[in-house]
Image: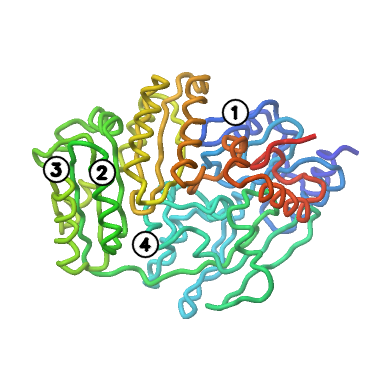
């Protein structure tokens, strides 16, 4: 009996081979399309079904691609020829909310924003806030160690994960971490699984730290600068002054052009008045910031050459936020978008924008860029015509990755390596660390069935 027949015999309707369903799991939000078609899609609804899938696949030596909501941006959960795609999106229960211990226990398919909404009545919130929180799942956030707009103040996903239940490649179920505030017993396997992109095991339950929901006034600043480098310099100065905004986002001139075209000049004028420029910086403080904090931020913005507008009411603050939020819809209206992701030390943020402009000129491609300026995480974007990555775009992307490393940064701040960046991984890690990581992978997955071809280059 072949593997698909064995899976169907044991799991029934959880298994599908319908061509239209298999087509959907060959891609993700990166736009990458895997070659070939998976053998089957398993839509698990229980831990036992995940265990059975991995046990049978391990016995058959067939690859398994774990998948959540499919919102990844590095092709980390796409399924191609000869593999089983294991979706945990239907495992979407919030199992426990423990207000006294400030934690929640969830299945991997829980949508980030749904957890946050469930916590609201308790005066709590789940701080990791990917820009995709309305559609991305907790399991996927854990798999990529997702970041977002609030990381500079509240941390990335890893800081919120206390413990995990994980199914290993052979179907065994293990539990890592703890429910306590402190816990240092043994190696920190929880941190190892966070960001492992489904290459070490399949997360089937997570115990996450939740925080008191911020209260008090929110103050939002929007500022235009004649040049994006000035905006980046202001952002670095605000970080250096220890002002700790909850949100600090930067939009370059090409990105602003797309937003103006999408929203219309009138919307931006309503938000910012007559001010204009080639760089836009959004700064937001939560929890009733001290007046001196806001005044100091305005002073630093003006010293860098910016014109700032300060909002203390929700409506105007939303208008300012709308400029940043409109960026991705604006690009998507022009075609399919490849959203890249590199990070640099915060003191090199202005240099990174200079390098991106140079690469744009060198390869004759537009690279509208936004950044989580509070933590040095940049998102250079490409509009991909016809959904095809042209050689010119690939070359420009490779140049971006090399430049990030030369600036002392990293290939990815939050999207993960997946397929799109695996060919540069050894450049960042070095040969010894790269070999060690492959050895760690082999300990957890000796037959190499978990998410084959992701993160590491395929070797014979």
Dot 2 or dot 4: first in sequence order is 4
Dot 2 or dot 3: first in sequence order is 3
Q: Quadrant of residue 385?
A: top left
Disc 4 and disc 3: Cα gap in Å?
A: 25 Å
The x, y position of residue 391, in whole percent, is 53, 19
Residue annotated with mark 2: 322
Give the total number of marks visible in the rendering. 4
What crowding class fits label 3: few (fewer than 14 Cα within 10 Å), some (14-19), or many (20 or more)? many
The x, y position of residue 79, in whole percent, is 67, 35
Labels 4 and 3 touching (C-beta < 8 A): no
Disc 1 and disc 3: Cα gap in Å?
A: 40 Å
Which label sits in the foreground, 2 or 3? Answer: 3
Secondary element at tag 1: loop
Labels 2 and 3 touching (C-beta < 8 A): no
Residue annotated with mark 4: 153
Residue annotated with mark 3: 272
Q: Residue at x 21, y 55 (%)?
A: 220
The x, y position of residue 46, in whole percent, is 69, 57
Out of 276 and 350, give the one closest to the viewer.
Answer: 350
Disc 1 and disc 2: Cα gap in Å?
A: 31 Å
């Amino acid at each position: 009996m072949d593997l698909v027949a064995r899976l169907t015999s044991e799991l029934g309707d959880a298994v599908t081979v319908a061509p239209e369903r298999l087509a959907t799991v060959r891609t993700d939000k990166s736009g990458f399309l895997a070659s070939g078609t998976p053998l089957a899609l398993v839509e698990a609804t229980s831990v036992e079904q995940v265990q059975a899938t991995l046990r049978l696949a391990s016995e058959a030596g067939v690859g398994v691609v774990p998948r959540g909501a499919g919102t990844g941006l590095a092709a980390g959960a796409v399924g191609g020829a000869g593999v089983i795609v294991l979706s945990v999106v239907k495992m979407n229960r919030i199992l426990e909310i423990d207000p006294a211990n400030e934690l929640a226990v969830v299945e991997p398919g829980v949508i980030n924003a749904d957890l946050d909404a469930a916590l609201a009545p308790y005066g709590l919130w789940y701080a990791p806030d990917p820009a995709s929180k309305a559609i991305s799942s907790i399991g996927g956030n854990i798999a990529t160690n997702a970041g977002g707009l609030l990381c500079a103040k509240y941390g990335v996903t890893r800081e919120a994960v206390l413990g995990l239940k994980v199914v290993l490649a052979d179907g065994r179920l293990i539990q890592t971490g703890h429910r306590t505030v402190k816990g240092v017993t043994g190696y920190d396997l929880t941190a190892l699984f966070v960001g492992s992109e489904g290459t070490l095991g399949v997360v089937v339950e997570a115990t996450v730290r939740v925080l008191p929901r911020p209260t008090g006034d929110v103050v939002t600043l929007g500022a235009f600068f004649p040049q994006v480098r000035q905006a980046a310099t202001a952002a670095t100065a605000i970080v250096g002054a220890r002002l700790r905004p909850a949100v600090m986002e930067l939009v370059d001139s090409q990105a602003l052009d797309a937003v103006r075209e999408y929203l219309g000049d009138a919307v931006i004028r309503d938000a910012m008045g007559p001010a204009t420029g080639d760089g836009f910086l959004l700064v937001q403080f939560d929890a009733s910031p001290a007046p001196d904090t806001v005044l100091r931020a305005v002073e630093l913005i003006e010293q860098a050459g910016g014109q700032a507008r300060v909002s203390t009411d929700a409506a105007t603050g939303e208008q300012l936020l709308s400029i940043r939020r409109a960026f991705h819809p604006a690009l998507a209206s022009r075609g399919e978008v490849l959203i890249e992701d590199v990070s640099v030390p915060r003191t090199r943020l202005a240099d990174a924008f200079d390098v991106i402009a140079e690469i744009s000129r060198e390869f004759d491609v537009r690279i509208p860029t936004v950044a989580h300026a509070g933590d040095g995480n940049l998102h250079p974007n490409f509009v991909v015509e016809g959904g095809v990555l042209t050689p010119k775009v690939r070359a420009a992307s490779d140049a971006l990755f090399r430049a990030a490393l030369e600036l002392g940064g990293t290939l990815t701040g939050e999207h993960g390596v997946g397929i799109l960046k695996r060919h540069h991984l050894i450049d960042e890690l070095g040969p010894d660390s790269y070999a060690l990581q492959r050895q760690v992978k082999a300990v957890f997955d000796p037959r190499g069935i978990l998410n084959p071809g992701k993160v590491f280059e395929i070797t014979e």
